[in-house]
C-alpha cells in the first residue's frame, strides 16, 4: 500500500492510496484519476510517502491525513483489508504491544488495535505516536 501526494493540472494537492505504483500508472492511463477539488484528470505524482506501520508518524502528517478524508468508501475498504491482512490485531492491548515492539528493536511486527485517548497520550509522552486510520465497517 502506497500513499501518493497527487497534484492536478490546477495545482491542487491531495493524497490517495494505491496498492502499488503500477496501480497508479494504470488508473492514470485509463483516466480514472481525478482531482478531488476540480475533477481535473491531469493528475501527477507529487512526493511519495510510504505508509508508516503504527509508530513514528508525526502529528502534522496525521492532521493532514485527517483533513484529506474525502476518500472514497472503496479506498477505505481497501485500507481496512490491507491492515487486516498485514497487521496483527491486538485489540485493546495496543498500547502494551506497541511498547513491547518499540523497546524490543528486533521485533518488526505490524499491529493494530484500539487505544484510549489516555493511553495515546502516555505513549506520546514516551515518544511513541500512533497512526489513526480511518476505519470503515464492512457492512457500511
Ligand atoms: Zn484540481
Image: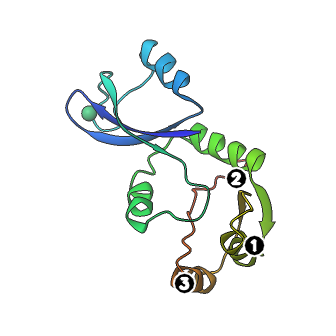
Real-space Cα separation, disc 3 to disc 2, in angstroms: 26 Å
Query: From what the image shows, is residue 2 above or below residue 123?
Result: above
The residue singled out by tag 1 in the image is 97
Quarter-of-image position of residue 129: bottom right
Ligand 1 lies under 8 Å from the Cβ of mark 1? no
Q: Determine whether the residue tagged by mark 2 lies in a helix, strand or loop.
A: loop
Q: Position of residue 8 (x, y in %)?
A: 28, 30
Q: Residue at x 45, y 51 (%)?
A: 69
Q: Answer few, some or many: residues within 10 Å of disc 1's Cα (few below 14, many 20 plus, some between 14 and 19).
A: some
Of the pair 30 and 112, the residue shown nearer to us: 112
Label 3 sits on a secondary structure element that is helix
Q: Quadrant of residue 47?
A: top left
Give residue 137's mark: 2
Q: Earlier in the sequence, mark 3 or mark 2?
A: 3
Q: Which residue is mark 3?
A: 121
| Residue drawn where x is 78% and y is 75% of the image | 93
Earlier in the chain: of badge 1 and badge 3, it is 1
For the point 38% across and 57% down, the residue is: 64
Name the residue nearer the viewer: 85 or 52.
Answer: 52
Packing grade of label 2 (10 A; few <14, some 14-19, many >=20) is: few
Relative vertical location of residue 33 with respect to residue 18 in this rendering, above or below: above
Judge whether 51 appears above or below 111 on screen. above
Of the four image quadrants, the one with ligand 1 is: top left
| Secondary structure under the numbered disc 1 in the rendered image | helix
Residue 30, image x, y percentages: 46, 12
Residue at the limit of the structure toward the front, as seen here: 106
Pair 3/2: label in front: 3
Position of 14 with respect to 123 (left or right) is left
Q: Is residue 49 left or right of residue 9?
A: right
Give the class, few, some or many, for how many residues have Cα within 10 Å of label 3's Cα (few <14, many ≥20). some
User: Left of 99 or right of it: where is 74?
Assistant: left
Amino acid at each position: 500500500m502506497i500513499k501518493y501526494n497527487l497534484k492536478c493540472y490546477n495545482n491542487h494537492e491531495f493524497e490517495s492510496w494505491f496498492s502499488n505504483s503500477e496501480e497508479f500508472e494504470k488508473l492514470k492511463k485509463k483516466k480514472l484519476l481525478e482531482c478531488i477539488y476540480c475533477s481535473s484528470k491531469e493528475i501527477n505524482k507529487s512526493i511519495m510517502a510510504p505508509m508508516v506501520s503504527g509508530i513514528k508518524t508525526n502529528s502534522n502528517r496525521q492532521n493532514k491525513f485527517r483533513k484529506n478524508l474525502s476518500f472514497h468508501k472503496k479506498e477505505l475498504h481497501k485500507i481496512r483489508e490491507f491492515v487486516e491482512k498485514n497487521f496483527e490485531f491486538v485489540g485493546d492491548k495496543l498500547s502494551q504491544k506497541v511498547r513491547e515492539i518499540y523497546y524490543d528493536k528486533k521485533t518488526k511486527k505490524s499491529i493494530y488495535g484500539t487505544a484510549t485517548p489516555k493511553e495515546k497520550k502516555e505513549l506520546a509522552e514516551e515518544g511513541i505516536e500512533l497512526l489513526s486510520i480511518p476505519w470503515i465497517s464492512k457492512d457500511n
